[in-house]
Amino acid sequence: MSSSAPTSVEAAPLRPEPPTSGLDRFFRISERGSSIPREIRGGLATFFAMAYIIVLNPIILSSGTDKFGHHLSGGQLVTATVVTAAFTTLLMGVVGNVPIALAAGLGVNSVVALQLAPKMSWPDAMGMVVLAGFAIMILVATGLRERVMNAVPLGLRKAIAIGIGLFIMLIGLVDGGFVTRVPDAAHTTVPLQLGADGHLTGWPVLIFILGTLLTLTLIIRRTPGAILISIVAMTGLAVIIDAVVDIKPAAWGLTVPQWPGNPVSSPDFGLLGKVSLFGGFGQVGVLTGVLFVFTVLLSCFFDAMGTILGVSDEAHLLDDKGDLPGMNKVLMVDGIATAAGGFSSSSANTCFAESTAGAGEGARTGLASVVTGLLFVVALFLTPVATMVPAQAATPALVAVGFLILAGGIRDIDWSDFTIAVPAFLTMLLMPFTYSITNGIGIGFIVFCVLRLAVGRGREVPPALYVVAGVFAFYYLMPALGLAS
């Protein structure tokens, strides 16, 4: 995102102040034009924006059944989800020094629960995830992953960041109840509708609307702590409304804004280490097993790539070429997170686009990730409290930050060059339209390579991008080739 259009609630100072403490020096807080209070606010905002994963990931994984009819325990999944998110986010903060939080990836967990597990046992399925993490770490160690990211043209990088912004905005609108999926029974080609029935009704939706207006107003007024203030205020209002008005719990979605009777819960670590690295190959065969690992790897690889670029752009951490200094450390932590998710049976962990909530709050360093990670540690014992923030109070941050990313990056794309403008356009729109970061990146890469070849500019495309586009093309063709299970 262009530094001439600051998108955070506080503009970074032109001249960084000298370090004031060891903490400041370690995280380079003043050097990046931030402050400890701003990093703390950013860490809090990110945590509340992604805390839903504590509830949602166990629901998705526990809904699946393995080949032998076994379900995973919901309570154990909560512990596994929180422990892994805490560990990987803290690691990203300390090693990567970027304001990016990690947790179980949405989409990948569905693949594990609905595609892998029915073909094998749960430990076998999680072993596939660990192997995908190992493969990612090898790609990072050899420099191949960073070379792929550096081969992406600046215009496509900006498009990826904007696509992330549009994607998280749609997530905010859907999770906030402002738009909903039209049921298949309606027999309509319109996929989404306003509210639950074409109208905006109910107190939860009102909380979302008020939260969005409050967040945008505070951001425009450059109020310090804008996003966090809105989340806390709307949560308090939601608790009050739920207490005085008869609202069905289902209207709030996964999280009902009620103060828990017992705020303390005991973690159950029973799933940690329940993994079989190569048992799945014996169940499905070597070729299918490799394809399963490839599917997990591809999703994690490019979802994380898009998120890292998007959040780093929002946090003004990219250099003039659009590269992130110290990228290899960030990528290695992401690979470790994928393997750690399999080891804990929480599914592959990856970088969360909701980290833009913290970047929008002004976070610029890994201290924000440390704050988010520590909050996950607290949530391990206070899960009922951590999960009392309703989506309607947290998701307005995603809508606001989505707009800020769009406003700050769209001018940096060369719209006069159609060979970059068309793939950038498709990348931006297909992320929200297919509800997948990976699909947006994949189609964008393929179209970019094809168009450059078509106009005789094929030599301008880095070889690594041809390889990646070919991998994506093969991935999309696997069902037609009879290779997808």
Image: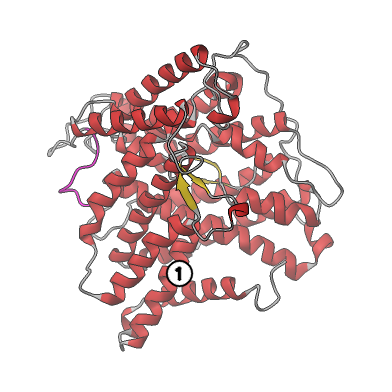
Asked whether 46 or 184 is in front, the reply is: 184
Residue 352: x %, y % from top left? 47, 44
Amino acid found under the numbered disc labelled 1: Ile
Where residue 7 sits in the image (x, y, percent)? 23, 42
Q: Quadrant of residue 256?
A: top right
Q: Is residue 78 left or right of residue 123?
A: left
Is residue 102 depicted above or below 48 in this figure? below
Residue at the image point whose x is 60% and y is 48% from the top: 348
For the point 34% across and 45% down, the residue is 402
**Main structural element of the magenta stretch: helix, strand or loop?**
loop
Say which quadrant the C terminus sits in: bottom right
Q: Which residue does the numbered mark 1 point to in the structure image?
A: 443
Q: Position of residue 431 (x, y in %)?
A: 44, 58
Looking at the image, residue 479 sits to the left or right of residue 274; the answer is left
The structure residue drawn at horizontal position 51% and vertical position 58%, both measured from the top left corner, is: 301
Extreme left residue here? 14
The residue depicted at 54 percent of the width and 14 percent of the height is 259
Specify whether 363 is left or right of 132.
Answer: left
The local crowd at label 1, few if under 14, some if 14 to 19, many if 20 or more residues have their Cα within 10 Å, is: many
Is 78 in the magenta? Answer: no
Q: Magenta segment, which residues?
A: 1-9
In the image, 340 versus 217, the foreground residue is 217
The correct choice, above or below, for 236 with respect to 45 in the image is above
